[in-house]
Image (cartoon, rainbow, N blue to C red):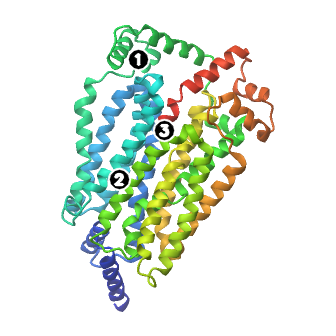
């Protein structure tokens, strides 16, 4: 009984410090109503961690199933049907409090993750295939920027004046229905991807009409011929499986580098910042009434940093931005640790903690936030690229899940020193990239292969044999494949 009362006292104190965590309170009230006693702190932490991290498992499922779905239904229809997941998730999560079931909220998070996993592949794929190749890269970057805008809008809607109160937080999940309904209304009036219609459905007339709609001109014979020429090149290339890719010695270090960069992309600690920003600001001594507005600044900084990175990536290169981004994160994680440790002794240190959090987000977005996906598209032949993105996506979502699940326990065990774990991961990633990663800016696939050939301990000729095990191609055909791979950089945008 004494332990029970002590547990209740600890939870009451914890809620006072984190009184904006209405979902945790909902979990505890539901548990107490069912079983007659409050949930212990470790179980509550586990439930919250599962709720946060289960989204990544849904995302992994969505990323795995999107390939057969877009092949069977097409790009536009996949996006249209995907709204079923979004609406279902919104209903489950928004009604969970009314139904007194936190299981509905967790299930909704899984389904919402599936929706995200599908849309974050199908939408960029659709946009890249309907746009002229001259603006595919720019359009892909705009997509990433608007994802940041979406995060920012979510933060705005979470303000106390809107849905950020104990009585209105379920409505925040219900808002998901709005963009889903917008898609349901607009998408039926848009044509299907002309590339999909031409190459997979072999419907030339519909493909021509789609090109005419998107390009705004009547004569699209040149665009149709370019797609057909690209198709003729690709027919000579046999797609490799994930297992074949992992066994190919000629791309061994490319695969390792993709695994390292994608692992560090998630494990570097940014998700911990996003998932637990309110807790971090609260522990930094920020007034609870101010926290929602301070958190709002993180979305604005992320958007500005993403735009800045898109403007300078072709000028500075991938390597400096990626290594420099990790390096800056190490510095600011260290300063944040010192600030959190000494904040009770110096009155202005909580504001330094806020600055460090914003700086960590900006450092991530200028390099580690997008470049790993770019490198995955640049490292591999077109025949290897689908398998490479499957490896990258698997590492991405599993690492995301691990951070969401484990960070509360790391934070509980290490307290103010928890961010040193992420600083160590950033240091390991930056060190690896410094010694292994070549600069890929303005380089062809052939030149990138040359850069890795020595480390893979194979000649370029051996790499070409590994790429084309069935037949040796002429140098003209190989150059055509390299050009096709570079021109079709939209494949990497489908993951971002």
Rendering coords of residue 142 (x, y %): 40, 37
Q: Which mark is residue 85?
A: none
Mark 1, secondary structure of its residue: helix
Rendered position, 297 above or below 255: below
Rendering coords of residue 471 (x, y %): 73, 18
For marks 1 and 2, the one nearer the N-term is 2
Q: Which mark is residue 495?
A: 3
Mark 3, secondary structure of its residue: loop
Residue of label 2? 109
Look at discs 3 and 2 and give the one toward the viewer: 3
Q: CA distance from mark 3 to mark 2?
A: 21 Å
Rendering coords of residue 114 (x, y %): 39, 44
Mark 2, secondary structure of its residue: helix
Q: Which quadrant of the structure image shows residue 84?
A: top left
**Count of numbered tags:** 3
Give the residue displayed 34% in from the left and 57% down from the top: 106
Rendered position, 219 above or below 201: above
For marks 3 and 2, the one nearer the N-term is 2
Give the residue displayed 46% in from the left and 31% down from the top: 68
Q: Which mark is residue 197?
A: 1
- Count residues near mark 1 (Cα–Cα under 10 Å), then give few for <14, some for 14-19, many for 20+: many
């Amino acid at each position: 009984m004494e332990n029970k009362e002590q547990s209740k006292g600890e939870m009451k104190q914890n809620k006072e410090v984190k009184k904006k965590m209405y979902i945790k309170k909902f979990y505890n009230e539901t548990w107490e109503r069912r079983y007659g006693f409050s949930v212990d702190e470790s179980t509550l932490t586990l439930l919250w961690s599962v709720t946060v991290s289960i989204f990544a498992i849904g995302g992994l499922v969505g990323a795995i199933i999107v390939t057969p779905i877009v092949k069977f239904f097409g790009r536009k229809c996949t996006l249209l049907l995907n709204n079923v997941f979004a609406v279902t998730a919104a209903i489950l999560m928004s009604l969970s409090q009314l139904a007194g079931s936190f299981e509905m909220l967790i299930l909704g998070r899984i389904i919402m993750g599936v929706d995200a996993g599908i849309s974050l592949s199908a939408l960029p794929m659709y946009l890249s295939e309907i746009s002229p190749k001259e603006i595919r890269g720019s359009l892909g970057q705009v997509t990433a920027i608007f994802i940041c805008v979406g995060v920012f809008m979510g933060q705005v809607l979470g303000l106390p004046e809107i849905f950020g109160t104990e009585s209105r937080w379920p409505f925040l999940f219900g808002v998901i229905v709005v963009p889903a309904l917008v898609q349901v209304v607009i998408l039926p009036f848009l044509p299907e991807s002309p590339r999909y219609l031409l190459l997979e459905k072999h419907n030339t007339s519909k493909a021509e009409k789609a090109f005419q709609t998107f390009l705004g001109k009547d004569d699209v014979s040149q665009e149709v011929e370019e797609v057909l020429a690209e198709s003729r090149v690709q027919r000579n290339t046999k797609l490799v499986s994930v297992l074949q890719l992992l066994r190919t010695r000629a791309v061994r270090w490319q695969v390792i580098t993709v695994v390292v960069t994608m692992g560090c992309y998630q494990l570097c600690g940014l998700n911990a910042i996003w998932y637990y920003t309110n807790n971090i600001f609260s522990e930094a001594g920020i007034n609870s009434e101010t926290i929602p507005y301070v958190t709002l600044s993180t979305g604005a900084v992320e958007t500005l940093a993403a735009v800045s990175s898109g403007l300078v990536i072709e000028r500075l290169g991938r390597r400096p931005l990626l290594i420099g981004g990790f390096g800056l994160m190490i510095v600011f994680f260290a300063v944040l640790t010192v600030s959190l440790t000494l904040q009770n002794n110096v009155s202005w240190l909580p504001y330094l903690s806020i600055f460090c959090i914003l700086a960590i987000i900006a450092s991530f977005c200028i390099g580690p936030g997008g470049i790993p996906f770019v490198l995955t598209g640049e490292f591999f032949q077109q025949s290897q690229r689908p398998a490479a993105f499957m490896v990258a996506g698997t590492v991405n979502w599993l690492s995301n899940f691990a951070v969401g699940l484990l960070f509360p326990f790391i934070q509980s065990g290490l307290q103010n020193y928890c961010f040193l774990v992420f600083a160590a991961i950033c240091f390991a990633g930056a060190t690896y990239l410094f010694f292994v990663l070549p600069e890929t800016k303005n380089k062809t696939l052939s030149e990138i292969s040359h850069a890795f050939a020595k480390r893979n301990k194979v000649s370029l000729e051996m790499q070409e044999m590994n790429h084309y095990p069935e037949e040796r191609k002429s140098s003209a055909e190989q150059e055509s494949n390299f050009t096709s791979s570079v021109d079709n950089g939209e494949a990497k945008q489908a993951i971002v």
